Amino acid sequence: MKTIVCFGDSNTWGYTPETGFRYAYEERWPGVLQGQLATHVRVIEEGLNGRTTAFDEPFRSGRDGSEALPSILESHRPLDLLIIALGANDLQPLYNASGYDSARGLEKLIQILKRSDAGPESSAPEILVIAPTRFNPSCEVVKRLLPGAETKFSTLLEEYRKVTEANACHYFDSNEVMVVSEVDGVHIDAPNHRKLGMAVTDKVKSIFRL
């Protein structure tokens, strides 16, 4: 049985756009993945609201993904695949970061994984990068709290693809199958969690030839 860790932010944790509560396990995309591949994989959720690739939030501790990742690898080793589903929070104005900066954060995470021995037989685990879903620029929340994010997002998606290719990682662009909720323009609803979970299922099957 393969062990998969889903390392992400609020859209991995399962933040509900309408209420701010959490979707049920089976509704969240890692839960969908687990349900589809129950006899082949063990899916471990490591989602945290506000998590970034490599930026430290001044108001809440523990949001820097590059600081959290080493201990997560130690906690769950040996693991066969780590899925990185981060990047959207990097574009918050408080970090003053560009899409290019976010891609450098992603590369830092990839290098931590490449240098680790947390995979099978003390090797490095496989890496799947899921590019984040674009914000909805017409949403009032996005207009007010994330000015200029659409331009940054275009750069982010372009740079993420370059980084994953340069580092021989698996890659999936979530924008191919889903959109964010119209409620807040940032988070995904239950039907789109399912779409992502099904798409990731196909990707995992391809990686491990299941």
Image: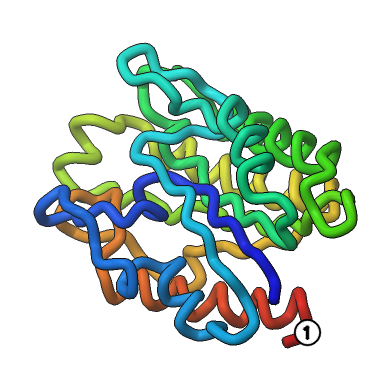
Q: Quadrant of the N terminus?
A: bottom right
- For the point 43% across and 48% down, the residue is 47
Horizontally, is 121 left or right of 54 in the view? right
SS at circle 1? loop
Q: Horizontal and vertical percent for residue 178?
A: 40, 70
Name the residue: 62% across, 63% down.
Answer: 4
Which residue carries the number 1 mark?
209
Q: Is residue 159 above or below residue 34?
A: above
The quadrant in which the C terminus is found is bottom right
Vertical placement of 183 versus 36: above or below? above
Residue positioned 85% across, 37% down in the render: 115
Is 157 displayed left or right of 141 in the figure? Answer: right
Amino acid type indicated by mark 1: Arg
Could you say which is closer to the camera, residue 100 or residue 125?
125
Residue at 52% in and 59% down: 44
When the figure is inspected, residue 207 is found, relative to residue 47, above or below; the finding is: below
Which of the 4 quarters of the picture holds residue 69?
top right
